[in-house]
Amino acid sequence: METLFIGYDNGLVRALVNGQVDAAWALEGDAPVAQIAVDPLAHERMYAATLGAGLWRSDDAGRTFARLSGIPNELVWSVAVSASDRNDGYGTVYAGTQLSALYRSTDGGATFEELTSVQEIPSLPEWSFPPAPDTHHVHQITLSIDEPDAVIFGVELGGVYYSADRGVTWSRTTADPDPHTLRTHPDVPGRLYEGGGASYHESRDGGCSWTRGSFDGIPDDVRYFYSLAADAGDAATVLISGARDPFSGHGNITGVPVWSSVYRSSGNGWIEVADGLPAPDGTAMGALAAGSPGVFYYVTDPGEVYRSADGGRTFAQLEYSNDVRGGIARTVLAVPE
Amino acid sequence: MSDISTDAQLLRLAVQQLACAPQAQRRMIQLGHLPRAVANLDRLGADLTPFIAAGILDDEQASLVAALRADLRGRLAADPDFLAQADSAPREFLLSSALETEEWHTLRLGARRAYHAIAGEQSPFIAITAR
């Protein structure tokens, strides 16, 4: 079983999953929780990135969080903790902000240094978040599980960048330039995944080079992708959420019919996951997460939790033991026991 | 029916869409948003005095919007398929390098200057409600 952490627009819920969802608020407020990260080798230490209230840290496995002060920007979109770059038992932390900037801490978030090299990336003048061009941000960060100097981050919307030298120099990769989700496989060195705005990409060399995945099995009118998760027990099995466009997918534009679905691939084309998930019509894109091997979660509005124990082939909705939930889930993290 | 506030929103939306990253703009072409944005900029930008009179734009902001409109008109005159609509239907268009020319790069930077001027440092989210 897993502990789920669900980021909402009004806080962070910690939920024990054991046949049902036993949830409690771990962080409440007005600032949306954009991303949650756990130290992969020290699960008691977690971080939550918020849009408006900066970065937060937990030292009790996500039961409570305390605000960190080392990042001079309250709009923190992304956070990641390294499994391979360790300091006194804890992973080096990277956090990304709006406007796009990248910060690193080697002391558990007590202090951060900005990686100013990011501001010298030649393409920076073109970075632009579509709904408001002046608000581009570091939407995703992922870190190698075996190369402590490798750092990968993605700008919405401005590309995916790779560094082999802890951010001294950067190269733009050929991944989708709209990196909605970047994931590292927890057990397979070099294996990375991207759920991009227009396509799925994967890397076999730690994020240095990327290959666009096939669209086989995905209807031609499904051209927008968002959340992604890879099976912790089978690096070839991936789930991705898809929609016809951002407006139908996110369901945040009045008058636009809402539609989204989830697709599964084990390397031989995509199959729509229909068994156990809500029907595409009327369902906005939720957040996917991988748990223990073979386990996936999909959290939809308003905090409905669906769990798969067969590698994403089928899902079942979980009941809540209470009603602690927000609205649209921005992000979800599953931490195995 | 149109009113000055609706027109102002459409004008800002047009500038925003011309300021976006190429992949977003290719999607906006597939969805029909960018051609509408271009038409709105051309129509509303032809006479910016109502926006100035209403206090929506100052002279400098109007100048930037007018310059963007003039730039776009010139590029469309030189290349009627400047928006690359002719081959825009397939999925591959979304993944292509269309709109990544030097001409588009220059236009985009001009649009971003105009957008920055009219939206301010803390740009509000502008709902995609173009008609």
Image (spheres, rainbow, N blue to C red):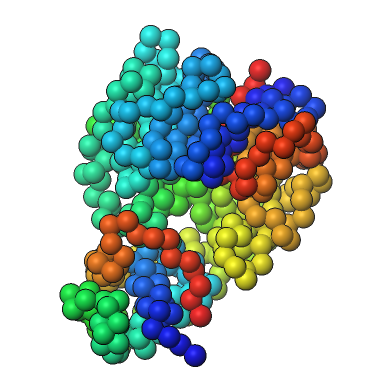
| Residue A171, x across and y down, in percent | 31, 41
Report the residue at 65% width, 55% height from top: A284
Can residue A166 be seen here? The reply is no
Instruction: Find the residue positioned furthest to the top.
Output: A88
A292 to the left or right of B17: right
A146 to the left or right of A167: right
Report the residue at 54% width, 42% height from top: A10
Up/down of A91 relative to A102, above or below = above
Report the residue at 28% width, 62% height from top: B120
| Residue B26, x across and y down, in percent | 45, 67
Q: How many marks?
A: 0
The image quarter in which residue B115 lies:
bottom left
The image quarter in which residue A251 lies:
bottom right
| Residue A1, x across and y down, in percent | 72, 22
Report the residue at 60% width, 51% height from top: A214
Closest to the observer, A47 or A237: A47
Up/down of B78 relative to A302, above or below = below
Instruction: Find the residue positioned furthest to the left.
Output: B60
Where does the C terminus of chain A fall, quadrant-wise?
top right
| Residue A292, x across and y down, in percent | 67, 24
A74 to the left or right of A175: left
Can residue B128 be seen here? The reply is yes
Closest to the observer, A48 or A177: A48
Up/down of A37 relative to B46, above or below = above
Closest to the observer, A305 or B79: A305
The image quarter in which residue B96 lies:
bottom left
